[in-house]
Image: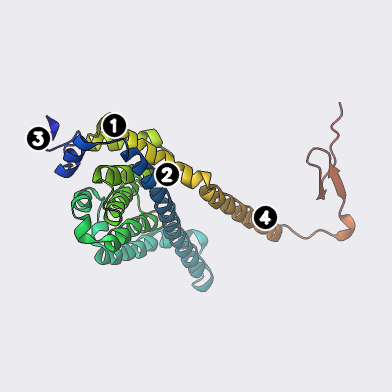
Amino acid sequence: TQWLRGGTLIQSFKVPNIIGQSLQDFEVRFLGYGVLVGFISGLIGFAGFLIFICGVRLGQKVFMRMKIFFMKRVGLAEAVSHNIVTVVNPVIGGTLLGLLYVAVPLCLGGGLPQLYAVMTLGNRLGARTVAVTAFTKLLCLGISQGFGFIGGPLFPIIFTGACTGSLIHVIFPGIPVIISFASGFAAAPVAIIPGIFTVTALSSVMFLLGGAASSAVFIACVVSYITVCGMGLMQGFILKGMKAAEAARSGGRDRSEPELDPSSRTVVMNPLLEKTQVGEIPVSTTG
C-alpha cells in the first residue's frame, strides 16, 4: 500500500517508480553487482573523507594564523585575539561556503530536497556533475566543521553516498538502479562510518527494499568496509595522524623545557621500558 501512495516510512521523501518496478525483477546475479558497487563506493568514500579532512584543516589553520596575527602584529592579548578570531573565522567560512554553493547548487542545504533530483536526473546531470557534487558536499562539510559551524555530519555523508550510487548507475548503465543507487547510498558512508547494519537498515527502510534487495545492499556495505579497512587505507591515515601529533607534542615539549647542563645528565636504563632515558630517576622494581 505504501508503494500505491508513492511514499516511504519517511513521508517527506518520495521514491522514484523505477525502483519500485525493479524490485519485482530482482535476481541472484544482482548480489555480484553489489560487490562491484561496494568496491567502487569504498574508494569514492575514502577519497571524499580525505577532502573532508582538507576542509577541516583549512579552517583550523586559518584560525591559528589569524590568532597569531592579532597577537604578534597587532599586539592584542591572547584571550582578546581568541575572541576576535572566534567571530571572524565563521564569516570567512560562510563566504567560502557561499561561493561553493553558487558553483555547485546541489550542495546547498542539508541535501534532502536535492536527493530526489540526484536519483531521477542522474543521466541528465552527467557523471562529471554528480561526481563534483559528491566531493564538493564533503568539502562543504569539512569547511563547516573547521570554521566553527554547528551541525551533524551524518546526512551530508549519506547524500554523498546517494551521489555515488547515481554516479555508478550513469557510468555502468547495465547495473540496475535498485543495486547501484540503494547500495551506493549505503556503501559510501560505510567507508567513513563503520555502521554496516545501521546504514543497511536505513537504506532498506527509506526505499522499501525488502529482504532480497537488502541483501545486495548489505553485501555492498561489507565490501566497502573491507576495501577501506582491509587495504589499510584508513589505518594508515590514522597512524600517520598519530605520528604527526606525537611529533608536534614532542617538539613543543623540547622547546619549552630548559636545556640541562651536560654534566648534570644521568643516563638510566628503565627495566620496564627497556629504553635508555635521560634525566630519569631509577626506581627499584623489586619488593
The residue singled out by tag 2 in the image is 224
Earlier-in-chain disc, 2 versus 3: 3
Instruction: Note whether residue 188 is visible.
Output: no
Identify the residue shown where x is 48% and y is 64%: 67
Q: Residue 62, position in %: x, y?
A: 45, 65
Task: State the image quarter where residue 216 is shown.
Answer: top left
Identify the residue shown where x is 31% and y is 52%: 168
Earlier-in-chain disc, 1 versus 2: 1
Residue 5: mark in rendering: 3
From the image, which quarter does the N terminus lie in? top left
User: In screen coordinates, is 115 left or right of 272?
Assistant: left
Give the amino acid type for the residue marked by disc 2 in the picture. Answer: Ser
- Check the image and report above or below for 87 versus 226: below
Q: How far apart are marks 3 and 4 (CA)?
A: 62 Å
Q: Distance between the residues labelled 1 and 3?
A: 22 Å
Q: Depth check: give the residue in front, 212 or 165.
A: 212
4 or 2: mark nearer the eye: 2
Q: Quick one: SS at disc 4?
A: helix
Residue 212: mark in rendering: 1
From the image, which quarter does the C terminus lie in? top right
3 or 4: mark nearer the eye: 3
